[in-house]
Amino acid sequence: MRFRILGPTQVVLADGREVPVGGPRLRALLALLLLDAGRVVSAERLIDGLYGEHPPRGAANALQSQVSRLRQALPAGHDPVEFHPAGYRLAVDPDDVDAYRFERLAEAGRRALADGDWPRAAAVLREALELWRGPALADAVGAAGAPAQAARLDELRLAAIEDRVEADLALGAQSALIAELRELVVAHPLRERSRGQLMRALAALGRPAEALAEFEDARHTLADQLGVDPSAELAAVHLAVLRGEEREAAEQALPSQLTTFVGREEELRRVGELLGQRRLVTLTGPGGAGKTRLAIEAAGRVDGDVRFVELAGLADGSDVPQAVLSALGLRDAGLRAPAEPGRQSTDRLVEALAERRLLLVLDNCEHVIADVARLAARLLSACPALRVLATSREPLGLAGEALCPLSGLTLPPPDASTENADDYAAVSLFVQRAADVAPDFTVTQANVDVVLRICRTLDGLPLAIELAAARLRALPVAEVAARLDDRFRLLSMGSRAASPRHRTLRAVVEWSWDLLDDAERTLARRLTVFAGGATLEAAGRVSGLPAAEFVDALSGLADKSFVELTGGRYRMLETVRAFCAERLAEAGEADQLRRAHTAYFLEFAWTASDHLRRAEQLHWLRRLDAERDNLHAALRRATAAGDAPDAAGLVAALSFYWWLRGMRGEAARLAANVLDLLGAEAPPGLSEEFALCVYNSSLAGAGHLPSLGNQRSVIRSLDRAPRQPFLLYLSGISTGPPSGGAEHVEELMRELRRLVGPDVWINALGAMGSGSALMWSGEWDRARSALTTALDGFRSTGDRWGCMITLGALGELAAWQGDPETAGAHMDEAMGLVEALGSAVDQADMLRTRGEIRLRAGDLAAARDDFAGALLLAQRSGAPEFVASARLGLAQVARLRGDLVEARRLCEEALVGGLTGWYVGEATRSEIILVLDEITEQEKAEAASRPGAPPSADGA
């Protein structure tokens, strides 16, 4: 529990719920005990405090009754009130009492101030002052001794406020302090320290006349009320104002920061190099990317004169020259001279900077971009020693401008080890800011995945990460991650010292949104339908804007950091995308854009599927990889919307791609969802798509699925050549070849050729099926001829996958015929093709095939290496038949080495999971059972050969 007496007395549980304590006397009793938390308070002091000079009869009993009521008011299991012979003790940690915690923090802040650690002093003192909710001991004002304690605490509070103001002044926050200091001076006119701080802030802002007036007011007040002169300290401030020392000190300093600078080392180096080579450098990027902070850090490393101009507060671009004048200390016309009639602020700036060597930092230019650009162009052309470093969400657009784009901080790649996660800037920033509010927080093996999810979800944006880390004051890190779907609500508590547009995540994005024109807003909200970015063609087609309007709007969004162009793709940060998606829903366009997105990617998937069987296979694989998120998003949305033709069409179009990329598990889940939508039978016109949903679902060892019959019935059900020819391969490995051996296979292939005509790829696939059947029938010469025909066909189309599996079959055939050299040559070529394709499943298959060839040749060590590699790849890819066959190969190696215990264990493991319901799995299961029988026979033979073995029944 936490206890509060800096305001009304409160008891608060760990989850934030307040415990009602009772009436005024009960709260006064608790306050008196809390003033001496952890120590015994005498009954006499408590009676005196509660009842004053006229206690009731039986005051001790009355006190005991009040203590009993207090105990009942506190939650069960949380009774800290202890009875002692001398009185009562509240057995709580003093740090759980806000008054004690305030004093500790105030003292820590005072020490940091004395040490010159302004950022820490300001942060700690703010934390201390945030504990106050009203007058101290508000519920015990009438208790004996309480007024003196309340006065002491109030004095400590005022001192802490003045200490915090002192730190803020050192950090350059003069403008934000004026109103607060004026209130302090009015409330406490005799406190000279506050008066001196107000004078220093006014002088630093170029308002020395007001500062001197404050001194005169203080002198009169002290004389009238106390008959004394200002102290030596206040007189020294007065003298410094007269000499202009405060203004000079303020002009020399860049805004100091409350926190450490994390990451951006590469960008900091680049900005430094650019400032050495170019005269106009602009840091661009979305809101919250840390442009201002990087500009301050970079400017702080520059030798020579630097001036910082904050433009965020300007409502009108015409005020830009005056803001620069103020930052330069040239508030008065010219150089302390009267203004000439008609003289412009820009002319005065040119005169002041004509010979001056200066770096001018113009911060937050985007809302006054045209005026900033005009001013920068004029100054740079007229002042040869001037350099400008600007921060903006879009470039100034001037000739010679060097851009340094900023996005999120560095994140660990998806496949990176989590052991050194905090070596990456985004994670390091989260950890440091989290430790500010939860000092015990560190990245551990238990929470590292959650921290990574937070940083990745927030695109590594510094502001968003800092806002998320601040939530650790009240929420566990897992709860922060779980609530990021509603990130704008979660990240709504920013620094009170920040400008309003930087205080919350929503405010940051809204500021950028307000700077867009109507066409840019339309495109921005419509681009949110894309997942993983979009090509120029896709964005134009799906958005539905006229071509010329689309190009202008997209260029505007890129310039204003609403989209990023990387690798030929336009991408929105997820935070920006979430905001714009809300605008899409508000515009009532979400369903229209979903349909347009699905239609585009269905067409794209079918186009790509055709190219996957040709020489341009690798190029289209890469294109499909780039669009995978969009393709799967379109499929999920179509499924959720009940759009069966589009959902089933996407499954069909993507089937060969999924196979080539070894995406068994994800393909099975997506297909199973569509199968639920289609039902138990194929809807009219969707027979091919229905079959592909069934086959894809079956490959991951799914449960009960609709029966499609054998391969012959699938082929005969077609009334045209399949749009997805890979259906023929999937049907074969799922249901097996026709019964009756090679002759029936060839008969089926003749039927297929009559259906499809002269399709080279399908005929090559049929020849490969015939060759495989002939191999298993022992007709090796005919098998080689058929497989050679298949290989020639696949080579003529340019399909590396078809060549690879055919070469694997030819390699096996050569090994069976006792030709290991030819077998090795075929497998070497197959392994080269599988590496080019990058399919882990196919690599597992080829390693397994080569392992069997090496096993047949008697090279047990090499065979074992191949089977072990195949097992690892198959497990990663979710291919149960190859997991089983790899374990079977390892079992065969162990059996031949005489390790029957290991061989049996591997076989039994191979029988577990995913081998029922489809042909290849059942075939593998049969092989395992045969090998187990062989192991059993060997075990019997070994047992019989051991000395002392009992005679067999046959020899009895």
Image (cartoon, helix red, strand yellow):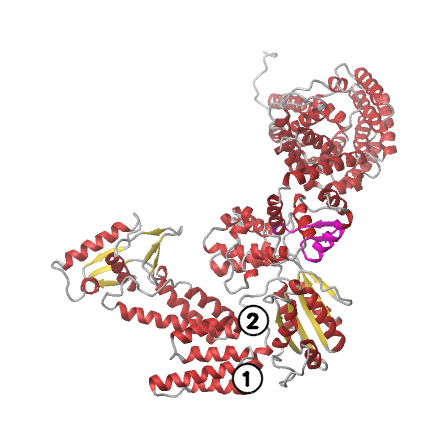
Up/down of 131 relative to 490, above or below: below
Few, some or many residues within 10 Å of mark 2 (<14, 14–19, 20+): some
Q: Which label lies toward us, 1 or 2?
A: 1
Q: Does residue 891 appear anywhere in the picture?
A: no
At horizontal 65% and vertical 67% (from top left) the residue drawn is: 317
Residues 489 and 205: in front is: 205
Question: Picture quarter containing residue 346?
Answer: bottom right
Q: Is residue 568 magenta?
A: yes
Kindly identify which residue carries mark 1: 245
Question: Picture quarter containing residue 295?
Answer: bottom right
Verify CB contact (< 8 Å) between mark 1 and mark 2: no
Q: What residue type is labelled 2?
A: Ser
Residue farthest to the left, as pictured: 57
Tag on residue 256? 2
On the rendered structure, is 749 left or right of 503? right
Up/down of 594 relative to 277, above or below: above
Q: Position of residue 593 (x, y in %)?
A: 67, 40
Few, some or many residues within 10 Å of mark 1 (<14, 14–19, 20+): some
User: Can you say which quadrant of the picture contains the C terminus?
Assistant: top right
* Number of disc labels: 2
Residues 726 and 407: in front is: 407
Q: Which amino acid does label 1 sit on?
A: Glu
- Per the image, label 1 sits on a secondary structure element best described as helix
User: Can you say which quadrant of the picture contains the N terminus?
Assistant: bottom left
Whole-number angstrom distance, CA of label 1 to CA of label 2:
19 Å
Up/down of 833 relative to 178, above or below: above
Q: Where is residue 441 in the image (x, y as percent from the top left)?
A: 49, 56
Q: Where is residue 236 in the image (x, y as percent from the top left)?
A: 47, 86
Chain part drawn in magenta: 549-575
Closer to the N terminus: mark 1 or mark 2?
A: 1
- Per the image, label 2 sits on a secondary structure element best described as loop
Up/down of 906 relative to 343, above or below: above
